[in-house]
Structures are given as C-alpha cells and as structure tokens.
Amino acid sequence: MSTDTAAVTHTEHEHPSDAKYVQIAILLAALTAAEVSTYFVDIGPILIPALLVMMVVKFFYVAAWFMHLKFDSILFRRFFVAGLILATVVYCIALTAFEFWSKG
C-alpha cells in the first residue's frame, strides 16, 4: 500500500447570482398571484388542472433553486420527483373521491 493519501475531488459548481434568485422569487410571486386570482376570477373547468400545474412548477423551482437540488446528485432529484408525483396522484384520487362519490 502506498503511504500517499488519495486526493478527494469534489465537483464544484458555480452558485447562481443574487439576480437569479430575485428573478426566481419574482416568478414564484407571480405564480402565487395567479393562484390567488383563481379565487376571484371564474376560469371554469380548467381551475383544478391550472392549479395543479402551478403547484408543480412552484415545487420544482423551490426544490431546484432554493434547496439547491439543481446542483446535487441525480438521486436526490429522483426522490423529490417521485414524491411530487406520489403527492399529485394521492391528491387527484382524494379529489375525485370527494367530487364523484360523495354526491348522495
């Protein structure tokens, strides 16, 4: 065995600038405003799909940028995406249960 210690290499990534975080915060604020506006504006039958899409987009941006998943291992991203898919499926199942099976 060699007495030399193996150098551990870390993959460094360049952190985004403050301006990028401000842009993402503005995008998240705009999406939140759009979600809140659905309470006041009747958009008809596309209400639930629109809210679900906005929810997924906001989750993606928060997890990817503010939780730094964009720069982490692909394994962590897969766990978060699997959780997002599972949560969306459970929510849709519960929503259909209340919508279709509760009318007496």
Image (spheres, rainbow, N blue to C red):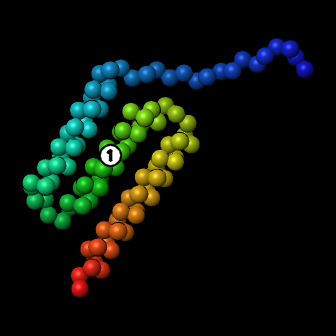
Q: Position of residue 23 (x, y in %)?
A: 27, 28
**Screen quadrant of the N terminus:** top right
Relative to 102, 10 lies left or right: right
Please identify the residue farthest to the right as the structure is shown: 1
Q: Which residue is mark 1?
A: 57
Q: Position of residue 57 (x, y in %)?
A: 32, 45
- Amino acid bearing label 1: Val
Which residue corresponds to the image point at 38% horizontal and 43% vertical from the top-left? Answer: 60
- Up-down relation of residue 14 to residue 40 (above or below): above
- Up-down relation of residue 6 to residue 29 (above or below): above
**Screen quadrant of the C terminus:** bottom left
Which residue corresponds to the image point at 20% horizontal and 61% vertical from the top-left? Answer: 46
Q: Secondary structure at mark 1?
A: helix
Which residue corresponds to the image point at 31% horizontal and 72% vertical from the top-left? Answer: 96
Q: Position of residue 86 (x, y in %)?
A: 45, 58
Q: Position of residue 38 (x, y in %)?
A: 15, 54
- Up-down relation of residue 87 to residue 19 (above or below): below
- Up-down relation of residue 36 to residue 88 (above or below): above
